[in-house]
Amino acid sequence: MAAPAHHPTRPTRRRLLGAAALGGLGALARPLWAGERDVDVIVLGAGLAGLNAALLLEQFGLGVKVLEARERVGGRLYTLDDVPGRPEAGGNQLAPAYARTVAMAEQLGVALATSATSPLLQPQRMLYDIGGQRIAAADWPKSPLNPLPAPLRAQPPDRALLALGGASPLAQLADWREELSRAQDVSVLARLREQGVDAATLALLAANNSYGSSLAETALLTLHYVQSNLGEIRKIAGPLQNVRGGNQRLPEAMAAALKGPLLRGQRVVAVDAGARGASVRCADGSVHRARHVVCALPLPALRGIRFTPGLDPLHAEAVRAVPYAQITQLHLEVLRPFWDESGPAPYVWSDGALGRVFPNDEQGSGRAESLVVWSNAAGAARWDRLADADAEALALAELARLFPASRGALRLARRVSWQQDPLAGGAWANWAPGQATRLAKACAAAQGRIHFAGEHTGATIRGMEAAMESGERAASEILSTL
Ligand SMILES: Cc1cc2nc3c(=O)[nH]c(=O)nc-3n(C[C@H](O)[C@H](O)[C@H](O)COP(=O)(O)OP(=O)(O)OC[C@H]3O[C@@H](n4cnc5c(N)ncnc54)[C@H](O)[C@@H]3O)c2cc1C
């Protein structure tokens, strides 16, 4: 690419890298593209992906402006600071294998602490509520209400679903979006039916499924990717972790480390890109100009943005059609512990309205100051149809059915529905059968001066680390043009 005429001293990538090695980044003059452009790069979205891209670009001397629609940063990392126990409404746990996330925390002096809450780590605490019957975890494997096949009977059904998908054939984690995985990019429902799984088992497997709104919409390939992801994560020993004081402290620290402006309350509605630069318009009418744009927004959020020229057809199809995980949480304040405090706080796996219930104690205090009723897919949609007061009444009645002593001991502190939030559109991309191998790479491909990041464009480790990886990739795409 030719250097812009108005800036004869534009640095090359080699010079930038050299400057970085000498610790001389701060000395690089900016902006690189002055004149009608405000900054070198505009980053859309102050989640982990956008913030990581912005920090890396700044580190290489570029002038960056971040536009964020909300008043808070962090996006799908969201600590409910005003709910007792400070629960996480969004991204919950990170693993030592999250190399970029862990390194960022270390670099910014953000402390990580061993996570205490995962119900998956403590299955012995689970109370099963199946067809309205209470079943203790110890009785679950032999319960007549447990239709799971013999080797899987001790597990909660959502974990059994992963196992029923069979061993992952992915040779490498990144193969989940490659054409060579096409044969697995099919509905898990069809596969389970071929295996002769009966209707009762299918109904239980569909309850609390995190990977599709129904089994028909759940891709076998996703289950394999999740399995391979767990395998990859386990290669680095160590417990799951949370950020001390709340996961949102990490994006807050990243935002504080930025040199350039981060404008909050700026919802982007249009992105126009040409041969020489790009402009971004926000809902308040403000227009921002730069050489490049990093669009670090989840796919459903792109529905509210007009791109000129339009998105690549496969990318546009993904924006329209890729379903996101539906998750609704009811965070209930514990006014009085209603369980024997010498024993565990309640963990529930229900095929009814409750979905799953577990104590909020990400900070490992050992006290459950609040509980979360966590519903996925159709269960989440059911809660979304209720007004707050009705949702609270139903949740408390259901818990009182299981724990009579809970009457009068709980109140609704906060409800969070990720699918009802247009800036998220759901919790994470749940590529439907046939979508990952056809659409995922198109969502990560740059279009001229627009570069795409976000969890759904990460190639390897899922979740927070995918967001961080994607921000790094988008930043390096821009740096490679210098
Ligand atoms: C309930 C839940 C549980 C999870 N659990 C885990 C877990 O245990 N471990 C794990 O690793 N991951 C987990 N995740 C996933 C993880 O939180 C995400 O992958 C990650 O935070 C996504 O980061 P991102 O930067 O890609 O997107 P986001 O965090 O969504 O950032 C995008 C940003 O863009 C902003 N935005 C949207 N539209 C516009 C617009 N038009 N203009 C300007 N700004 C806009 C949003 O407000 C947001 O701040 C979980 C997520 C959820 C919701």
Image (cartoon, helix red, strand yellow):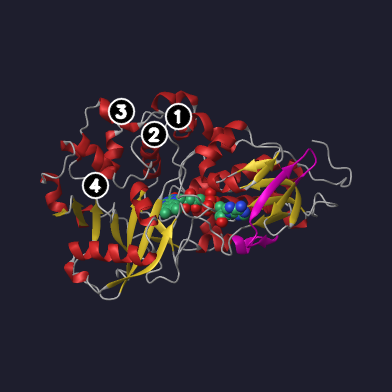
The magenta segment is: 255-278
Q: Please tell me whether mark 4 or mark 1 is closer to you in this view.
A: 1
Q: Name which quarter of the figure residue 413 lies in.
A: bottom left
- Label at residue 191: 3
Residue 478 in percent (x, y) is at 69, 42
Amino acid marked by disc 3: Arg
Residue 195 in percent (x, y) is at 24, 27
Question: Viewer-proximal residue, 212 or 72?
Answer: 212
Q: Which residue is mark 4?
A: 156
Q: Is residue 231 magenta?
A: no
- Label at residue 434: 1
Amino acid marked by disc 2: Ala
Disc 4 versus disc 1: distance between alpha carbons? 27 Å
Vertical arrangement, residue 57 with respect to residue 206, above or below: below
Is the residue under label 2 in contact with that under label 1 (CB below 8 Å)? yes
Disc 1 versus disc 2: distance between alpha carbons? 8 Å
- Label at residue 28: none
Q: Which residue is mark 2?
A: 219
